[in-house]
Image (tube, helix red, strand yellow):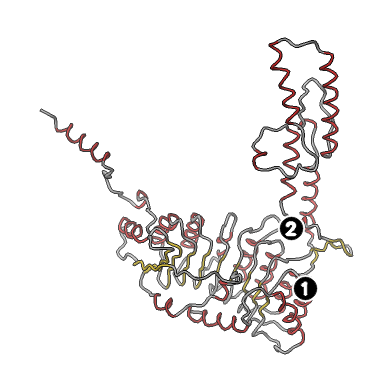
Amino acid sequence: MKKRGDNSAKEKVDKVDSGIEEDPPKTADDYQCSGNLEMDLQELCKLMGMREIPAVKTKQTEKEPPPDREVMEESQTQTISESQKSMWSPKPCLQVELEDEDHHSTKEVKISGWMVDEQMLQVLNKTLPSLNSLQCLHMWRTGLTGYTFTLLSNTISLCSNLRKVILEGNSLPEQSYHLMIGDGSMLTHLSLRNNCIGEEGARLIGSALSTVHSANKNLLSLNLAFNSIGDSGAVYIAQGLRFNRSLRCLSLSYNHIGDKGAAHLAEVLGLFALTHEEIVERRKLLMKGEQSTLIQPSQVSLTDSTSEPPPSVHSSSSLDRTINNKSVKKKDNVKKEEKPTPGQAAKKEEPKLAKKDSKVARGQTGKLSSKDKNLIVSESEMFVQETVEVTEVVVPLLDSEIQHTGGKVVYPGNSCLVSLNLSGNKLTVQSLKLFLSSLTSQGDGGLQRLSLNRNRFSPECDTFLKIQELLSPKDSFNKNSSGQVEDEEQVEAQTTGAA
């Protein structure tokens, strides 16, 4: 007769073997997301005791032919179609776009016009990082607070392939939008339109773009249209452009910017003098670079352990001469030695192998492949390799085109920004003259499009026409007029609730 305990134990083993879970997850923390957003969302909302579970509306991505031109300014000129507007609803709903018929291929998620509270953010924190195909997150008027925005920023950092975030109509008293482009951010496109961003928010964003010590290296386009940045905020944004070398498109349209703020934006595009702080930091970097090219005696280890340590070596050529001299001395010592015993034969082969590995071809020290880096090399070769890696790091303050003129250190300016939108501000002809001067100094490179419509100057003024004539051959974007771009932004602002 079998005992009841034996039967229960056997039943547990059968459940494990059949792959059936013994107990369902009791809390949201215990739930393991599958990558199916609709299913995971419903399960997590139930586990968290939410009364109203948001609906999930999915659609498959329509395949379109690749564009002939770059679309880096997409976030600036994007319009909302009638079909998209009809899908938006104040009721909790997630608009999901799939790459194909597979519900595990979520490419884009839109949340529009309903309150996303802390509880819902915790659900998104579990579901979004599990979507391996997620590339774009669009949130409009979701009632974010400073705390929920911080939770959202942490969630975005966990999404491995998320590169585009559109966060519009969410005013934050803390002005902490810079968290989206902080250290380690992988976003390439960010839209922060109509968020009431003021001077403080612009200051934080400018610092996130670049400082003397750090710079964002991934963001390609930033849309700050329809905010309240003003002249003071524009100064901070210009400060962030001084040493940023990733941003390509920037929109500051309809931000109450006048000649004072525009003057700083124009200055950063052309030649400008470094500040005292920047000069001091440049000297530190130069001194650090000079020190890294020196080898201390304790860092050099040659194959002949019986010889005295060599003096400091200042170049690869002197290093080669030192190795060659040691090799000659070693050959003389070998000739004087008696014939080695069988037990000493292995010891004699070691210095030969080390000598063979220590040879470095001149002129090729900077072309080490990844395979070569994994080999066991001598310390002298490791030093040469480390020196090359340091010099390959691009540091704007060490730009080779920096000049010393009139007692000032003159920097060549930001030539990476290719599109700047300043439509709908308060610029006069005074600002246009400064932009014309900077654009002329850039030559063939630099800015390709400068949108200046609806400012305080006549479209027929000579300076404006010269700017258009200068940029027209360089414009590689779509050949729509800047006036059409501006009108599209107005329509979009009205549909998204701009005041």
- Give the image location of residue 410, x and y in percent: 82, 63
Judged left or right of residue 194, residue 4 is: left
- Give the image location of residue 206, x and y in percent: 65, 65
Between 235 and 459, the one lying in front of the other is: 459
In the picture, the quarter occupied by the N terminus is top left
- Give the image location of residue 17, x and y in percent: 27, 39
Between 189 and 185, the one lying in front of the other is: 189
The circle drawn on residue 438 is 1
* Residues packed near mark 1 inside 10 Å, few (<14), some (14 to 19) or many (20 plus): many
| Image quadrant assignment for residue 43 | bottom left
> Label 2 vs label 1: CA separation?
19 Å
- Give the image location of residue 191, x and y in percent: 55, 69
Q: Is residue 376 among what the camera can see?
A: yes
Kind of residue sitting beneath label 2: Pro
The circle drawn on residue 396 is 2
The residue positioned 38% from the left and 63% from the top of the image is: 101
Kind of residue sitting beneath label 1: Ser
Q: Residue furthest left?
A: 1
Label 2 or label 1, whichever comes before in sequence order: 2
* Residues packed near mark 2 inside 10 Å, few (<14), some (14 to 19) or many (20 plus): some
| Image quadrant assignment for residue 470 | bottom right
Above/below status of 375 relative to 149: above
